[in-house]
Amino acid sequence: MSQPNILITGTPGVGKSFLCEKLSEKLDFNWIDCSKIAKDMDFIEEYDAEYTCPILDEDKLMDYLEPLMANGGNIVEYHGCDFFPERWFHGVFVVTCPNTILYDRLKARNYNEKKLKSNIECEIFGTILGEARDSYKADIIFELNGETRADAEKSLATIENWYSMWKLKKED
């Protein structure tokens, strides 16, 4: 594999999409937005009326992604990470955000109270970071701050530096 696969994960609203968009442009990688694919390809098991969101059919998504991931050069975006095969990723970047900032972002997205509370609790308890630590080797997991635009720029530089180091190791 000549290019790595990168996972960008974190609670909704932390800034994953911004990072993925910028990285896909800068690195010329394929941006795989799992939520968009699930909707476009109908990889939905059911709809959760309580949280007003679709429930992903993980098996269908995995079957669809398997051949894409084999080629490398992908940036995968999703708000969960524990169901992806460990072998797919060379770098796992978990974006976090202070809950007061995140609350305002999710409120602006018109999340209902139950969904809002659930996502804020997820961020407070570090659920996604915990999933990443339980699912992947520690040396490929990196925590990024998604509080401000300056943080996002710093995160972009961090991932670009990681990629440069990955290429150097690959050459050795």
Image: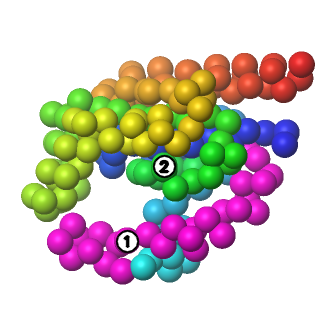
Stretch in magenta? 46-73
Task: State left or right for residue 125 relative to residue 32.
Answer: left
Q: Secondary structure at mark 1?
A: strand
Q: Quadrant of residue 169?
A: top right
Between marks 2 and 1, how big is the CA–CA gap?
15 Å
Q: Residue at x 33, y 41 (%)?
A: 127
Disc on the earlier residue, 2 or 1: 1
- 49 inside magenta stretch: yes
- Total marks drawn? 2
Task: State left or right for residue 144 relative to residue 104.
Answer: right
Q: Is residue 16 visible?
A: no
Q: Quadrant of residue 89?
A: top right
Furthest residue in direction left, as rendered: 113
Q: Position of residue 57 (x, y in %)?
A: 48, 73
Residue hosting label 1 = 55
Vertically, is 139 above or below 37? above
Q: Position of residue 161 (x, y in %)?
A: 64, 19
The amino acid type of the residue labelled 2 equals Cys
Q: Residue at x 48, y 50 (%)?
A: 82
The amino acid type of the residue labelled 1 equals Ile
Residue hosting label 2 = 81
Q: Residue at x 85, y 39 (%)?
A: 2
